[in-house]
Image (cartoon, coloured by chain):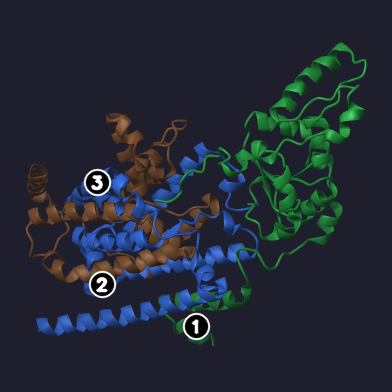
Chain colours: A brown, B green, C blue
Amino acid sequence: MTSITKILTHAFEKDEGHVHIHIKEKPYSNPYLVGVGLGLVLLAAFVIMGRGLGASGALSTAVAVTVNKIAPKHAAQNNFYKEYVGDETTNPLMDWLIFQTIGVLVGGFISGTVSHRVKKGIEKGPRISTRMRLVYAFIGGGLLGWGAKLARGCMSGQALSGGAVLNLGSWVFMMMVFVGGYAAAYFMRRQWI
Amino acid sequence: MKKFLENLTTNQKLGGVALVLGFIALFAGDPYGGTSIKVNEKDLALSTVGNADKISVNDLADWIIKDKADFELVDLRSEEKFNEYSIPNSQCIPLTQLSSSELLRNQKIILFSDDDVASSQAWFILKSKNYKGVYILDGGLDAWKEKVLFPKAPVNGIKDELDQFEKMKEVAKYFGGSVQTDSSITETKTQIKLPTSKSSNTKTTAPTGKKKKREGC
Amino acid sequence: MNAPFFKFEYFNRDVSLIIAFAIGIAFGIALEKGGFGRATILASQFYFTNMRVLKVMFTAIVTAMLGLYFFSVIGFVDLSLVYLTQTNMLPMVVGGLVAGVGFVIGGYCPGTSVVAFATGKIDAVVYVLGMIFGIFVFGEMFPSIENIFNSGFMGNVTIPSYFNLSYGLVVFLVVLMALGAFAAAEWGEKKMSEKSGKEKV
């Protein structure tokens, strides 16, 4: 873990010289208009596919497939891995969510490039070291990965997609994310403000 | 009024649209389509149960043996009769409960009852609710018994017919029935024992082998 | 035409993967334009300084909800064929709380971390690694927490069906709630910026 942060920190510092010579980035769009756009994308997914959007599912499949490659016997005993690996009749990597997530990667890059917002950097408040920020990023990612799996979905799969079809569990999940977030916000204030 | 609209910001306009649509939703009814069905009477009157909407009992037997699972087999009779005997892999949805059933519009649905009357009725109900792939089992359970469970041996059959009959024997055996030879038919008719539902219907509770892939995160 | 198209087999699985890619691109663009590729913006939601997350998310939910509702009422979309995640109350409450804490600590949620990754944020790379680790830990723990994972099973249940309200009424209430939240967010942002402005002077 520390070696990873070191490498990444190093990579970041090396690049610091370039950071200041970029074309001025465009401001972000009106949130309500973006929201309508995002809502229409979600609606398209419902109408065309009959399902919502997702994100964490792609990583789960990747993890399950990897575990299955390394220790097939171990994976076969575990219902969680088994569900993502499937019954071998179809390639688990030819999955809707995996392709959708690759699309998100491409879409994010396109939009960022057009608006001159693609640049190497680390998102953090002014009062925290780069290394601590990366440690927190890892811990936060771990918690979200774990929690999203327990709750059968993440912000996209549950809150957004489930929210639009008025799924009871999704709304509960969404409220709990806000509760958990606001409860932990005070302790994390050094990282952000 | 026009000036008022022009003075609104984009955000206010968006909010207004949402509010109006939300308000209409109050009165627009149930999106799950449970309460109000719009029936196009003309279309319905013109549509009749054609041959294309019928499935023969032999085809069905073939599909079940081959473990084809791309259809829902619906027994429209009462639960009592269903428990007594029904075609393997079928589910019991009495005609009166059809509208509240969990059949999905994209499924291939095969309806049957003792004969064709109830299944034709059910066919019209489902068609009027915009179900696409609705079929009826030609001849119903009566035909199933006669042709699949207890087929009669051909009298003085030519070779082809006899070959055919050998096949039918196997099919009958698979479903727990038996073949009736010409001589036995009159005596045994009353004694025909239907296969007990326990042995033939064990599959109804088990998953039908359809792959239900997760679609969530 | 009947929707959802895929469920009526207007196209096959291979085509659906191309559609997945296309929808993903649109999703990525929307998230990036919304500013969701930056952890500082996402986290500021929890300090009431910038309510973009709430605004974008609720507008998206309201838009998709209204669209889906009216498409279903006119008989274009068969809502019973639209996927609903089953509700398991306890794991969703616990999972939601853990995910919320993780959101503030990590600064991203899974979808936004991908966008941040695409726009060169190194912390997002670490975040994704953390998420993979978290999923792996969950997978390894799964046999022992399978009971909890499956507890509180309620099936496919929506707010209208659970509270026995009409679907249209809930749609209306969600619109009202969202508009109220937006008004509060705008007001709160104004107050916060006034406050910070005064402090600076």
Q: Going 29% across and 35% down the picture, which residue do you hit?
A: A67
State whether residue B45 is above or below residue B1: above
Q: CA distance from mark 2 to mark 1?
A: 28 Å
Q: Going 61% across and 69% down the picture, which residue do you hit?
A: B30
The chain that hosts pointer 2 is C
Label of residue C117 in the image: none
Residue type at the position of mark 2: Asn
Label 3, on which residue? Answer: C137
Residue B42's spot in the image, x, y percent? Answer: 84, 59
Label 2, on which residue? Answer: C50
Residue B46's spot in the image, x, y percent? Answer: 86, 53
Q: Quadrant of residue B40?
A: bottom right
Q: Is residue A30 in sight in this rendering? A: no
Label 1, on which residue? Answer: B5
Q: Residues within 10 Å of mark 2 (few under 14, many from 20)?
A: many
Q: Nearer the viewer, mark 3 or mark 2?
A: 3
